Each structure stands twice: as structure tokens, then as C-alpha cells.
Image (tube, rainbow, N blue to C red):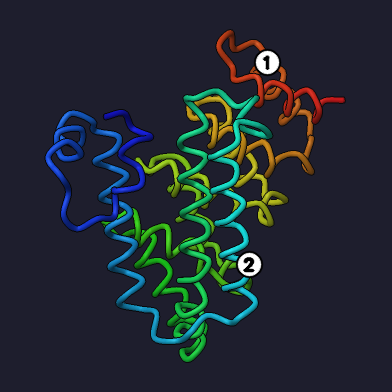
Amino acid sequence: MTCPDVEPFLLDPQLDAETQAHLDSCAECRAIRAELMDSQTLLRAHMDTPAPPAMRTAFYSMLGDLQNAQRTPTGWRSWVSPRVARPLRWAVAFVAVFALGAVSMSLLQGRSGPGAEVNGVLSQLEDASPTMRLTGVYTISDEAATQEQVREALVALIQTDPSVNVRVAALEALAPSLPHADVRTAVVQVLGSDPEPLVQLAALRALESHTSPEVRQALDELLETPDLEPLIREHVRSILL
């Protein structure tokens, strides 16, 4: 079995022999299965408040679009390389799942004071589980995002977190903080050092409204990378225009 063959069964509690044999030999699929199982456990523990109907409708609409894209090799799948396509599909899935989870977590955090919320967020961002760290990023409120401790924790995530999903989410959460020079410098460094195209794309989207000389120099240097993904190269060029 190939990785795409195994994907529909990664959340099954019982796996057949062929699927299990693939997991035994594929570290990437094992890691994805572990994160999905963690997310499922987390959502079952915290989803004590039903998601609003509009969000559920949006979730199922996005899920339907994703399924149609998987069946039809057109659109983004025709121009994103296979190395990027699979992580991108899972990134979309994680966003959808944690968008639902974030509703109940935000409501629970809203019952406490601002200080308690910041402490709770910092605890999540430092958790050993990538699923918990990802949930922490997605549940940061606008008020908590202005706190220096939270910004520093997010910067640490984009620099060192082993999970691509967490690094991407942290970059998105840091986008409003780009006017801060230390945050902008950290994002520029990640853009030039992180080899993952999804992380590079998230960094580019954060920086595209802050094209200082420092940022433009980093973009010029990125274009010199010989094996840069075409999608990333095109995005860099569009920013530099």
C-alpha cells in the first residue's frame, strides 16, 4: 500500500494487516496517525459546547471541496508538487478540525480573567503534545496576542517546533505582530532557514505587507535557492514586484 492508500484509514482504531505493515515501515504516516489520534482525543475531552451551525456548515463545505479536489487532479493539485501536496491536504484538515475545537476552548477561556487566559495559553504552547500546542495557537484571543510573553512563545515555536503544522499556525498567529522589529526579524530568519514549503509560504504571507529593506533582501536571497518550490518562487516574485 502507498501513503495515499493508507490515508482514509489513519483514524481507524483497528487496522488490517496490510495497513499496519505500511505504518510499520512509514514514519511519516505513523506521525500523522499519532497527531490525528491526539486531536480526536482532545476534541472529545473539550467539545462540551456545540459549535455554531454556521461553523459546522462551513466545515462540511470545506471538507466537500477537499474531497472533490482529491478526486479531480486539477486546481492546486496540478501545480503543487507531490512533496507539498500531501502535507498541504493534512494542513487543511487540521485547520478544519481545530476551528471546531477552538470554539469550545475559547468559550472556556472566556470564563476566566485575562491573566488566567495568558497562563493557560502559555501552558498549551509549551505542552509536549503537538496537538495541544496547535490548539493553544488557534485559541489565542486578540487580547492575549498582544502580550509579550505570548509573542515570545510563538516566536520560539516558529524557530524550534518539530511539527510543521504548529510552525505554520504560529506564523499565522504572529502576522498581526509584524510591526514589532523582533518578531519581523524572527520571521525573516525562519523564511531563510526552514526547508518546509508550507512554512515558507506561511512566512511569506505574514511578511508580504511588511516589505522593509530587510525583508526584500531576504526575499532576494530566497530566490537564489536552486531547489525552491515553484509555488514559493512565484509568490516571492509577486511580493517583489
Q: Quadrant of the N terminus?
A: top left
Q: Earlier in the sequence, mark 1 or mark 2?
A: 2
User: Could you tell me how far apart the alpha carbons at marks 1 and 2 are, in whole angstroms?
Assistant: 36 Å
Please tell me how crowded label 2 is: few (under 14), some (14-19), or many (20+) other residues with Cα within 10 Å: few
Q: Nearer the viewer, residue 135 or 184?
A: 135
Q: What residue is drawn where x is 57% and y is 64%?
A: 60
Image coordinates for residue 174, horizontal then vertical, percent: 60, 53
Among all residues in the image, which is located at the extreme bottom? Answer: 111
Image coordinates for residue 65, horizontal then vertical, percent: 62, 51
What residue would you read off at disc 2? Answer: 58
Q: Nearer the viewer, residue 23 or 115?
A: 23
Which dot marks residue 196? none
Q: What residue is drawn where x is 50% and y is 42%?
A: 89
Is residue 181 toward the left or the right of residue 7 in the image?
right
The quarter holding residue 213 reads top right
Q: Quadrant of the C terminus?
A: top right
Q: What residue is drawn where x is 60% and y is 36%?
A: 72
Which secondary structure, mark 2? Answer: helix
State yes or no: discs 1 and 2 in contact (Cβ < 8 Å). no
What residue would you read off at disc 1? Answer: 223
